[in-house]
Each structure stands twice: as C-alpha cells, then as structure tokens.
Amino acid sequence: MSYRSEIDGLRAVAVLSVIFYHAKFLAFDQSWFQGGYIGVDVFLVISGYLITRIILAELFEQKTFSFRKFYDRRMRRILPILLVVMLVSFPFAWLYLIPSEFIEYSKSIIATLFFSSNFFFYFSTTEYGTQSALLKPFLHTWSLGVEEQFYILFPLLVLLAHKFFRKHLLSFLIVLFLFSLQFSESMGLRDADFNFYSPVSRFWELLVGSLLAYVELKHGIIYNRVSSALLPALGIFMVIWSSVYFGSTTRHPGYQTLVPVVGTALIIAFSSQRDCVGRILGSKPLVAVGAISYSAYLWHFPIFAFSRIRDSAPDNLDKAGWIAITLALSIVSYRLIEQPFRNKLLVPARLAVITLISGSLLLLALQFSALATHGFEERVPKILRGQENISGQWYKEVILDSKCTKSGRSFCTSEISPDARWINFVGDSHMGVLVPNLKERLSDQYNVKNLVGLQCWPTLHVNQFNEQGGKLKYCSASYQRSRIDELRETKNSIVIISGRLPLYLHEEGFDNTEGGIELFGKHGSRFFPNLQPTSSGATVQQEVQHTLYEILEQGHQVILVYPIPEVGWNISTRLWTERANNLQKKLGYVDQNTVSTSYRAYLDRTRSSFSVLDGVVHKNLHRVYPHTLFCNTQIEGRCATHGDDALYYVDDNHLSLVGASMVNDLILRKIKEIEQP
C-alpha cells in the first residue's frame, strides 16, 4: 500500500493522548486528559487496518499467505526496541524497587516476553489508572499482549475463512466484530477489570480496522468531496472529545468506546492530503512524532513509573521533563534500533533471530535470578524484606481456605468443638489483614468464622458499584444480608468488626506536606465507592449504625476496631527510595518525618467515622483504638510507620503482620475482658 502520512499523524495523536493521560498534569485543581487512555484504542484500529491490508492483499493477489514473512515483519517491528527498554530498565529496578516489587516487575517482564502481560496484570489485581498502577514499570505492555494475541489468531482465522467460505469473508468479519463488541459491553458490567485486559473485549476494535481494509481492497479508497471534507473533521473531533471527556466512570471498552473507534475509522477511511484534517495530520511535526510513536509508547511508562517511585510528589515541570526524556530516547532508539532492524539488508534474518533470541534469554536469566533470590533481597536492609503482597497473602490464606471451599460453605469456618465459643471476623481487607494472626492465636480456644468481604464495610441496605456501574460482588445488599444472617447461627458469639470506614463514608482526604498524597485527597487518584442505599431517604451513615445495632441485638459481644492511621505512600518503597535518593545517608538516619504521617491529619480525616461509631451505644459494644499504638507515641504529633526492626505497614493503608499483631494485642485484651468481666 502507498504511504499515508495522515496515519502517522494519527499515531502521534494516539501516543500523545496516552502520554498526557499517564503524566497526570494538574491544572485548576484537576487532572486533564482523563480519557487519554483512548489513544490505545486508536492504535488498535490502526493496527487492525494495516495488518489486515497486508494479509488480505497477499491472499487476494497471490492466493496464498506466508506466515513466515508475516511474523518476520512483526518480530522486527515489535521485539528489538521492547527488549532494549526492558534491559535499560533493569538497573533502575535494582536501584528503586524493594524485593516484593522487584518480583512483580520480573514476572511482568516474563509475561510480556511470552505475549501474555494483559492476563498477568489482570490476575495480579492491577486496577488500571489508579495511583498504584502508575508505579508498575511495564503495565502498559498489556496492550502489546492484546495485539500479539490478535496477530497469532487472526491470520489463521482469515486463512481458514478465505479457504472454506471465501464469498462470506466480510460476513465472517462482521460476526466476529459484533460478538466481541457485545462481549465487551456485557463483561463491563460483570467484571470491569477483566473486560479491560481481555483480548476478546478488544478484538472488535482491531476488527473495525479489518473491515475498513477489506472494503478498501474490494472497492478502493472512498473519495467524495463532501464526505472527505466533513467526515475526517467529525472523526478527529470524536477522538479528541473522548480523550478529554472520557474518564474513570466510563464503561470501557464497550458501546461508549465506539465514539473514539468510529472517529478513528472515519479518519482512516475518508482522510487524505486533499482535506484539512489530512493535511494537519500529515504535517511534518505530527508525522515525526507518529514515526517514533512505538518507541515513545514503550519508553514513557517505565520512565514515568521510576520517576514517581523516586519522587512521590512530582509537579507539572517534573512531568514535562519526563516527556522530554521520553521523546529524546524515542528519537535515538528509532534511529539506532527500530529503523536498522526493519531493514533486511542491514540486519539479515539470521542475525535478527540470533540477536533477539540472545536478548530474550538474557532478560529471562535476569528475571529468573530475581525470582530465585526473592527480588535480590540481600541488597536491602532486613526491615524491608519479606513484604508480601497483602491482597494475595490474606486473600489466599483466609478467603480461599481450602477446607472452606471443599466443604461448599459460603463462608470459611474452623470449628474445634461444638461447645467452644464462636468468634466471627467481619469487615473488609483491613479486617482481613488481622485475621491470619488472630486465627493463629485464637483457634485453639475458639471456633472461628471468616465473614470478610473485599472492599466493603458491613452495611445492610446498601449496594456498592464500581466506577463503570457494575455491582460489586462482596458489597451488594444481598451479600451484606447473607453475612449478617450468618451471624445468627452462632449465638452469643464475639464479633470483631474492622474496615476502611473513612473511604466508605467519603471522608475527604488531605495532602501530605512531607511529600506524596495521603489517602484520597483532592489531587489523589483513589476513587470513593459508589454507594446507593436501598432504603428511601436513608444515608450510608445511618445504615452503618443500623447494621451495628442489628448485630448487637442478635446477642453478640461486638468488638469495634476504629480506623487505622493511613500513610499515603508505600512505606517500604518510601524508605528504600529515600536511600536511593540520598546515597550518602544510611537507612537508619532517614528523617522520621519523611516516613510518618500527621496525627492531626488522621483526626481530621476520620472525624465522620468516629462520629458514626461513637453514636452507637450498647452494653455489648467494646471499642479498640489502633491509633493509640502508632500516633503520639514514637514521635510527637506524628503517626509512626515503623519501629527499629519492623515495618507496621505493607503498603499505604494495610498493616503488616507486625502492625496487625500490635492491633490484635488490643483485641485479645478486649476478648479477655469479655470472658472475665
């Protein structure tokens, strides 16, 4: 096909949208380009169009298709610069990542090399767009996984369709498109994270480009003076509008994603150098950026991620510097790596294969070395070792207990004797991190039952939805009712309740003056839960109190754990990057204020939570205050995050095993008071 400069310009629009989205520039108290992630969707349409033209042109003209040539081109296009970016990132990972983060980094690179990083990031429970996601250097390779899976499946499907029902090839593509589109819309309501990363949910975007390619090859490029003047302008408006007005609440991908996708299709189908949009997109600056767009896409995310890890409170000038470095490296790598590898005379097939295999093996050797040494843990002080992924740790040990799942029960139980008293654990992940240590210390005296649900404080008559409008399994009104009803089976039990109530009650966050953003402040990226009470006129606060009273009226002794102090940044990473940023300082000499949080800010942030919990008065209610352990103890006016030998947190808001054990000491003291009044 002849070169179309406007497609390179469209690539520039796509990559700049993604880069500005990930940069998170702040102006007038908000982040702009909230929908810049649609740049990936633009890329997918372009890829589907170009790849399908290559495949179908060969089939239509030569009646055959060479898989070897096709994958040789894909290999030369994708792998050389990808391997270079990964290799260059390794020293920065060594410098800035703590062992648990290094392990995830290594696993993500291995997954990327095997074309499956989209599945890796889904199963590692990465919520794209959140603050924590921005610290994962190769999260952006999920889109490469989708494209590579398309490159593997699509040529084979087209070849079979062309061989057995050639006359219906267009119908075949349309059916695939409709199936994938409907799947993405339906899955968006059921599991938004899987929908985002799933290739089935994304293939329809590539297939829009495929349909364009088929129509062009069969009927020629469409040109009409009126349509070519109007439709490209409409298309670029749809793309830019989506990049500005889409956001975290947009159900994506799905029907709404048709806006940027159709906009991209209109530009490809009707734009040329004869119309205004085509001339703008074909201008030298945009074409130049489009030419380096693949390099820029690969470089920008690790640069941004390591920069954020190094400096938890970057300003707009810092972010502009990141972009400048990205573009500079992209120009160099385009000239020295991308262009030479695409030239078969400069890099023959044999040399290309040997080089790419050698680079891949070197990367794999480095990553497996990291896994074998637990993230090269010997390079960090003992206090920073063994910080497990908290969600995986407690979820595996508590929620997915094998004895529980094999028995077919809805909730996990451990019964030592019919005569033993029951202890019930109720709450969200903040309760979940307390459970393993509590269970270990109580299981020889008590029957225990785990009623922990992800992301939700126990509240009846309230449904909780994700940002895209899908109902959360563990926070639906029906689930909440089921776990409160479950308590009726254990008469006169002890019920321990803990959770992240400030988030649940939408309490405003605050900016950490020492650096970084604590909790979900005005400029933060955490999302408040989307809560909808089912009782007319009721508030969430009232339903929280109503639920506590219902549990109390069942006759249980209730131990209410008040909110823990939250840090705002991953404490392990903070300590380690302080060492990396101040190479002359030893870890023990880091200013405590940089790794602690404000006691006053904690009190301000939890004021509503204290008010709601203090408003519940009952003879069977017992209160535990975790902040008395951490705040105004080691440091006046501050809440400590670690002691001399151990961290109290594993991330920015979940307690470590040490921190949990400290809170559990208070809980066990209350249990003793209940048993011996």
Image: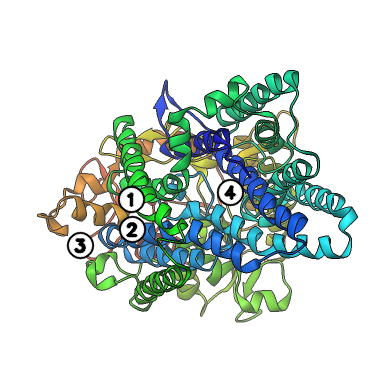
Which quadrant is the N terminus positioned in?
Answer: top right
Residue 609 seen in render:
yes
Q: CA distance from mark 1 to mark 2?
A: 9 Å
The crowd level at tag 1 (other Cα within 10 Å; few <14, some 14-19, many 20+) is: many
Q: Label 1 amino acid?
A: Phe
Secondary structure category for the residue under label 2: helix
Crowd around label 2: few <14 · some 14–19 · many ≥20 (10 Å): some
Q: Amino acid at mark 4?
A: Trp
Q: Earlier in the sequence, mark 4 or mark 1?
A: 1
Are there few (<14), some (14-19), or many (20+) residues within 10 Å of tag 4? many
In the image, residue 577 above or below residue 360: above
Marks 4 and 3 close (CB-CB < 8 Å) = no
Q: Nearer the viewer, mark 3 or mark 1?
A: 1
| Cα distance in 3D space between marks 4 and 3 | 33 Å
Identify residue type, mark 3. Answer: Asp
Q: CA distance from mark 4 to mark 1?
A: 34 Å
Quick one: 401 or 15, which is closer to the camera? 15
Question: Residue 502: horizontal and vertical position, in percent?
Answer: 49, 40
**Which numbered marker is on residue 89?**
2
Residue 642 spot, x, y in % from top left? 27, 57
Q: Which residue is mark 1?
A: 306
**Residue type marked 2:** Ser
State the image coordinates of residue 158 (x, y, percent, origin top left). 77, 60
Say whether marks 1 and 2 touch (CB < 8 Å). Answer: yes
Which residue sits at x=37%, y=76%?
A: 365
Instruction: Read off the residue under disc 4.
Output: 457
On screen, residue 661 versus residue 403, left or right, reads left
Sooner in the amino-acid sequence: mark 2 or mark 3: 2
Foreground tag (2 vs 4): 2
Q: Considering the numbered disc 1 on the image, is that residue within a helix, a strand or a loop?
A: helix
Residue for badge 3: 644
Residue found at x 65% / y 27%: 238
